[in-house]
Image: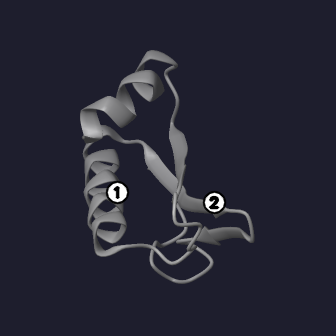
Amino acid sequence: HPREVFRPVLLDNACACLVGHNHPSQRLEPSPEDIEITNRLRQAGEILGISLLDHLVFGKQGYFSFVEHGLLSQACDN
């Protein structure tokens, strides 16, 4: 839930954050749920004035970056 993600960010008085997780399947492609939560986190961050810099999916073969694949706009100043 966005409140769980942003709790430590708010406690650190941060103005930006990035999130990441691994897929047990080791597939790097984001799931529909990954895309949905990324959009929710971006929207919540906009309300809070906290930029979501990127969402990374990690696996043995490397990583998938939402920003690099055009699924998340690069952060701008709030």
Q: Nearer the viewer, mark 1 or mark 2?
A: 2
Q: Amino acid at mark 1?
A: Arg
Which quadrant of the figure has residue 49? Answer: top left
Which residue appears at 52% of the width and 29% of the height? 14
From the viewer's side, name the closer residue of 29 and 13. Answer: 29
| Residue 40 appears anywhere in the view | yes
Label 1 and label 2: CA atoms lie apart by 20 Å
- The scheme the figure's colours follow is one colour
| Classed neighbour count for the residue bearing mark 2: other residues with Cα under 10 Å, few (<14), some (14–19), many (≥20) | some
Q: Residues within 10 Å of mark 1 (few under 14, many from 20)?
A: many
Q: Residue at x 53, y 43 (%)?
A: 17
Q: Secondary structure at mark 2?
A: strand
Q: Could you tell me which secondary element the residue under label 1 belongs to?
A: helix
Left or right, 43 with reference to 78 = left
Q: Nearer the viewer, residue 53 or 23?
A: 23
- Residue designated by label 1: 42
Residue placed under numbered mark 2 in the picture: 58
- Residue occupying the point 56% across, 74% down: 27
Q: Residue furthest bottom?
A: 70
Across and down, in percent, residue 37 comes to 29, 58
Q: Is residue 76 visible?
A: no
**Residue 78's spot in the image, x, y percent?**
44, 49
Measuring from the top left, give residue 11's x and y in whole percent: 44, 16
Q: Amino acid at mark 2?
A: Phe
User: How many numbered badges does the structure rendering display?
Assistant: 2
Residue at far front of view:
25
Residue 36: x percent and y percent?
26, 66
Q: Quadrant of residue 40?
A: bottom left
Please report whichever mark, 1 or 2, sits nearer to the chain's N-terminal start: 1
Name above or below for residue 20 compared with residue 2.
below
In this orientation, which residue lies closer to the viewer: 23 or 63? 23
